[in-house]
Image: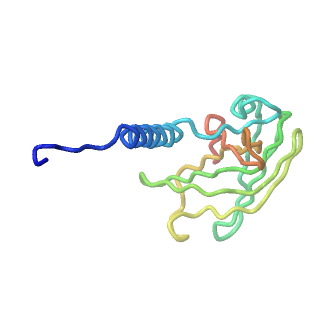
Amino acid sequence: MRGEKRGLSAVIASVLLIALVLVIALMIFLWSKGFLGEQIEKFDKPIKTYCEKIIFDVYRVNGTGGYDTLEVINRGNVNIYGFEVKMSSGGNSEVSNFALIVRSEESASGVFYFRMSGGTTIPEKIEVFPRLSGNVKDQMGRKTYTCRENGKVVG
């Protein structure tokens, strides 16, 4: 029986093919999940739709040593749950979070350190972007969303 060649049985070959297909399907699913991202909602609508409803003014009141007061007036009917502050100077930019909650049709102020790169560089341009809070779709918990199209430049 020297010339006889034996291969895998049909059952083992089928199991291996099914396992291979499942592994490939899992890899495609995980890869595509990165493109979709998680959806944050507010009152069962995408949170981005509420960015259009944000109306606010922001003022910088000079203090000392870079510690200035940032005053925000919320003229809209959507609560703002913090801000993202982008400071730019000489082609470089840094982003910081500013935890200041401003309820609808109210104002609030807080102290912010307006310096870049370890406190030595004064920024040439300061942009403030509002953040909203919402629920992550199909999950428990809340997350914030930055409305980057609603930024204001602070003088």
Which residue is at the front of the view, 4 or 120?
A: 4
Residue in view at x 70 percent, y 39 percent: 40
Residue in view at x 64 percent, y 66 percent: 66
Using the image, determine if residue 95 lies above or below residue 45.
Answer: below
Residue in view at x 75 percent, y 59 percent: 69
Residue in view at x 66 percent, y 56 percent: 97
Q: What is the number of callouts on the image? A: 0
Q: Is residue 18 left or right of residue 143?
A: left
Using the image, determine if residue 90 lies above or below residue 139.
Answer: below
The picture places residue 22, in percent across and down from the top left corner, at: 47, 40
The picture places residue 117, in percent across and down from the top left corner, at: 50, 66
Q: Is residue 3 left or right of residue 62?
A: left
Please, which residue is most extreme toward the front here? Answer: 1
Which residue is at the front of the view, 8 or 40?
A: 8
The picture places residue 105, in percent across and down from the top left corner, at: 89, 39
Using the image, determine if residue 142 lies above or below residue 149.
Answer: below
Q: Is residue 66 left or right of residue 91?
A: right
